[in-house]
Amino acid sequence: MKAKAAVKRIIETLKSIYPDALCSLNYEKDYELLFAVRLAAQCTDARVNQTTPALYARFPTLQSFAEADAAEVGQYVRSCGFFNSKARDIVACAQKLILEHGGKVPATMEELTALPGVGRKTANLILGDIYGQPAYVCDTHCIRITGRLGITNGSKDPLQVERQLRLVLPARESSNFCHRMVLFGRDTCTARSPQCDGCPLERDCDFKKAQKQAVK
């Protein structure tokens, strides 16, 4: 496991690069973030942000989503891929929020993951961004980069990565750290061609150290 001093350096370096660790999905209402994250599955946040303005204009309230025809919702989100299943989940989720939660997005992992189309990653994001709770959002960027750095053991399983991060990341830093992982993964530590030369995290990166050893 990565030393605490190294983890602290990584956290502080990322803070200096990305002082505003914000979710890249646009939303105004709590349930809109919930739906946007569902749309973002196997789709880019940029594409989702292009799609949701028209969607939310057509269905401006949670009630309107609950009463919507999933096929019509699907036409609005077609460009996000897997639109039929995503539309069905959004309508079913809206119905459950109204029937079981008084129209409010719940604030516990158990209640959130009981909603249609909501897994731990989405639930963690909601808990962190909406409710300010400790949140370990293990998306592809976070899994990849923490594995390369050596903060986690390289597992690709989101739950295993989440458990490992909970052991080393201070709870107060968790949500923002994960947002910064996304930004860093897009800018520098990409999946196919990470920009290792001159990387600000080079000192504490196991992946970079392994590269240097391989050259010797």
Image (cartoon, grey):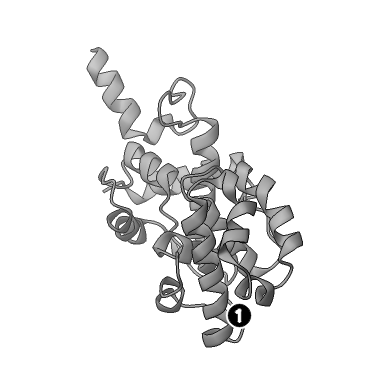
Q: Is residue 31 left or right of residue 1?
A: right
Location of residue 209 (image quadrant): top left
Q: Which residue is mark 1?
A: 104
Residue at the extreme right: 57
Q: Is residue 103 above or below residue 56?
A: below
165 or 96, nearer to the observer: 96
Instruction: Quadrant for residue 18, please give it.
Output: top right
Q: Position of residue 177 (x, y in %)?
A: 50, 52
From the viewer's side, name the closer residue of 160 and 209.
Answer: 160
User: Callout 1: few (<14), some (14-19), or many (20+) C-alpha neighbours within 10 Å?
Assistant: some
Quadrant hosting residue 27: bottom right
The residue shown at (34%, 26%) is 208
Q: Position of residue 47 (x, y in %)?
A: 61, 43
**Nearer to us in this view, 109 or 4:** 109
Q: Measuring 30% from the left and 47% from the top, which residue is drawn there?
A: 152
The answer to whether residue 183 of the structure is visible from this angle is yes
Q: Residue at x 69, y 68 (%)?
A: 29
Above or below: residue 159 compared with residue 134: above
- For the residue pair 59 and 135, the one nearer the viewer reads as 59
Q: Position of residue 163 (x, y in %)?
A: 30, 60
Vertical comparison of 99 with 162: above or below: below
In the rendered image, residue 61, in percent from the top left (x then y), is placed at 71, 72
What amino acid is labelled 1 in the image?
A: Lys
**Can you say which quadrant of the picture contains the C terminus?**
top left
Judge from the rendering whether residue 117 lies leftward or rightward of residue 94; answer left or right: left
**Label 1: element kind:** loop
Q: Residue at x 52, y 79 (%)?
A: 96
